[in-house]
Image (cartoon, rainbow, N blue to C red):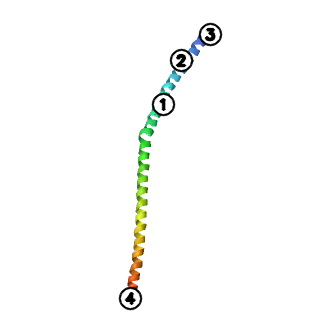
Amino acid sequence: MTDSAKLDLILEKVNYLDEKVNNLEIDLQEVKQKVTKTDLTIENEIRVNIQRVAEGHFDLSRKLNKCIILSNEIKDKQEIQGIYINIYNNKLGVL
């Protein structure tokens, strides 16, 4: 093989590698765009929706705590009323 043929073969290989590198750069740009799009989606949509859900759960938790307190107050009043009813029943039974 002559020096000219070797040089042509090397140039072919260099051109082939250059084309492959260019293709990889194009693919890398596409991947970067997809990652950027995914990051924006996470930042602008998913995070906001998670915050809304968390706020909703916080409100539900607060309302549940209020209902539990109210339920306990009603239960306490019912117990006191039950005691008064027993007291008056005993008084009425004695008379």
Residue contact between numbered discs 4 and 1, judged by CB atoms under 8 Å: no
Quadrant into which the N terminus falls? top right
Marks 4 and 1, Cα distance to the nearest angstrom?
88 Å
Marks 3 and 4, Cα distance to the nearest angstrom?
128 Å
Residue kind at label 3, given as amino acid type: Asp
Q: Is label 3 or label 2 in front?
A: 2
First in sequence: mark 2 vs mark 1:
2
As displayed, is residue 2 above or below residue 13? Answer: above
Marks 2 and 1, Cα distance to the nearest angstrom?
25 Å
User: 10 or 54: which is nearer to us?
Assistant: 54
First in sequence: mark 4 vs mark 1:
1
Residue kind at label 4, given as amino acid type: Gly
Dot 1 alpha-carbon crowd within 10 angstroms: few under 14, some 14 to 19, many 20 or more: few
Q: Is label 4 or label 1 in front?
A: 4
User: 82 or 29: which is nearer to us?
Assistant: 82
Residue 75 pos. (x, y %): 41, 70
Residue contact between numbered discs 3 and 2, judged by CB atoms under 8 Å: no
Marks 2 and 4, Cα distance to the nearest angstrom?
112 Å
Q: Is label 3 or label 4 in front?
A: 4
Q: Is label 3 or label 1 in front?
A: 1
Name the residue carrying label 3. 3
As displayed, is residue 81 above or below residue 35? Answer: below
First in sequence: mark 3 vs mark 1:
3
Residue kind at label 2, given as amino acid type: Asn
Dot 3 alpha-carbon crowd within 10 angstroms: few under 14, some 14 to 19, many 20 or more: few
For residue 93, the mark is 4
Which quadrant holds residue 92?
Answer: bottom left
As displayed, is residue 57 above or below residue 82? Answer: above
Dot 4 alpha-carbon crowd within 10 angstroms: few under 14, some 14 to 19, many 20 or more: few
Name the residue carrying label 2. 15
Dot 2 alpha-carbon crowd within 10 angstroms: few under 14, some 14 to 19, many 20 or more: few
